[in-house]
Amino acid sequence: MTTTITLSADEYQALLSDHQTLLAEQQRLTQQLRLVTVERDCLKERVDAFLHKLYAAKSEVRANPAQRDLFLNEAEALAPNGTPAAEESTPETIEVAGHNRKKRGRKPLDPHLPREIVRHELPEAERICAHDGSRLVEIGTEISEQLDIVPQQVRVIQHHRIKYACPCCDNSLRVTPAPARIIPKGLLTETALAWVATAKYQDSLPLYRQAALLSRFGGDLSRNTLAASMVRVGHAVQPIINLLRDHLLDADLILGDETVVQVLKESGRAAQSKSYLWAQMTGSGPPIRLFSYTPGRGGTHAQPLYDGIKSGAVLMSDGYEVYNAIAAVRGVIHLGCWAHARRYFVEAEAAIPKAARGPESLATQLIAAISELYAIEAKVKDLSVEHRGQQRQQLSKPVLLKIEGLLLQHLHAVTPGSLLGKALHYLSSQWPKLIRFIDNGAWPIDNNLCENAIRPFVVGRRNWLFCDTVAGARASANLYSLIETCKANRIDPYTYLVDLFRKLPTAKTAEDFEALLPWRLADQTA
């Protein structure tokens, strides 16, 4: 039996209105659920990325079996028979008919090291021939070498400044003047200052460890004495830093980067405030590495570092907005860094569950495509600038078109707040700068050179953690600049600093200071 319900027009309209209200509420709840789900997934992705950064391997390089023993404890490395591994050796090639045979042997010691000859002779009673009784004569030597290490030798240099007087009157008393020093009345000699500077800024040895090391050899110096000496010598080399900056700003290609540094005693700022160390280096002309301290990261701090850069020069940097402003104001060509673009996709790929990873995932596809660009760069790195540019146009341009196609296809199909979405939007915002490297064979594909130059500071920062004062931060920046510039020019930093500290006090003219630049002073010494 069918029951028919008759509704009036008003009742029907009310029921229809209630139904539409329920549908609208359902749609609202569905959208809200979708939004909450996306936010949850983004937050989970961020947590997974943080845990990966905290506990997983830091390198972005894909797994390589050749690197599996990179961090093996050398003291526990055993040969197959269970004995300690033999001395470091290098294969020596011997030409044999039909093929080359590699002969294993101990790696020779540096021929430039000083050598002390120790003769080992037979006793007189054993220099008699057992067959006919004749006396044995020397016909040659069997030579073997060992590496000897002499610990630090701490000594005191006494300066005797002779006094003179007239034997007939008291009006001609004279004293030999003290020699000019980089730190007037300083306690440490130039060689000692160079040793402390290279130990701290090249070998990342904090001053308190240096003080403990020196005390074992009789050099009872406090950490404060060493710190004060570094601050004073770091300020004394400022004329050389100014000259290096002039040469850097004249370069056709400049690379820039920055990193965090903490200064405890800074006027008007809390000890926990972030300050910054800016790195600048040349990509053309004499290799120069410059570091500068600023209390902030904004354009007001960065712009003065590039005052004087010539119009038409090339600036390589990451995607930090301040560099865009510098390029626009100074009229320079701005290049983007493919290493930074790739890094975001590596982070996005790492956040994908292992079960869902595969060559078909977008992050993996883009990483593989960027790797193709680097494979091309490895192939053309030894070519001339002109030929490298031609090869980039021929080989790299199609890869860039493939990357651009993937970018345009997925840019608006991925949640912007996800790691992959952020990677895609970074790639999109940097795209005009990222593709410029194919226009000139002399332009780099990434900013890795500058990141490598700043790495020694980052390693040292893990040991000494912070700077005490602004003066100390600026002095450290100057000494880092000199040491890293020496390394870039293949000059021993310690030898250079000793020569510089001895000659700088007597420099008077612009030509005198110019002669003290690392590559010029090294030529004079040679």
Image (cartoon, grey):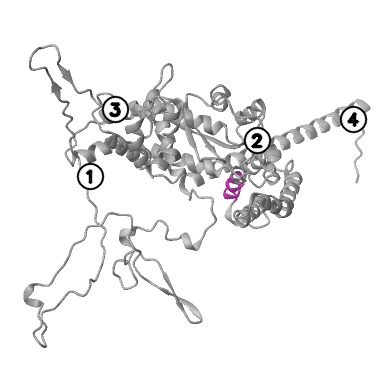
Query: Which-is-in-front pick, marks 4 and 1?
Result: 1
Query: Which-is-in-front pick, marks 2 and 3?
Result: 3
Mark 4 lies on a secondary structure that is helix
Crowding around mark 1 (Cα neighbors within 10 Å: few <14, some 14 to 19, many 20+) is: few
Question: Which residues, given as a range, are shown in magenta?
Answer: 343-352
User: Residue type at mark 4?
Assistant: Tyr
User: Residue type at mark 2?
Assistant: His
Dot 4 corresponds to which residue?
Answer: 12
Q: Find residue 293 and report its horizontal and vertical position in percent.
A: 46, 27
Q: Hey, which quadrant is residue 39 in on the image?
A: top right
Q: In whole angstroms, how far apart are the C-alphas of marks 4 and 1?
A: 100 Å
Crowding around mark 3 (Cα neighbors within 10 Å: few <14, some 14 to 19, many 20+) is: some
Dot 2 corresponds to which residue?
Answer: 334
Mark 2–mark 3 CB contact (< 8 Å): no
Assign the magenta stretch its main secondary structure: helix
Mark 2–mark 4 CB contact (< 8 Å): no
Instruction: Choose between 454 and 409: the one closer to the eye.
Output: 454
Mark 2 lies on a secondary structure that is strand
Mark 4–mark 3 CB contact (< 8 Å): no
Instruction: Choose between 417 and 424: the one closer to the eye.
Output: 424
The quadrant the C terminus occupies is: top left
Dot 1 corresponds to which residue?
Answer: 152
Query: Which-is-in-front pick, marks 4 and 3?
Result: 3
At x 64% / y 27%, what residue is drawn? 330
Q: Find residue 389 and report its horizontal and vertical position in percent.
A: 69, 49
Q: Hey, which quadrant is residue 86 in on the image?
A: bottom left
Answer left or right for 12 relative to 215. Answer: right
User: Residue type at mark 1?
Assistant: Gln
Crowding around mark 2 (Cα neighbors within 10 Å: few <14, some 14 to 19, many 20+) is: many
Q: Closer to the N terminus: mark 2 or mark 3?
A: 3
Dot 3 corresponds to which residue?
Answer: 181
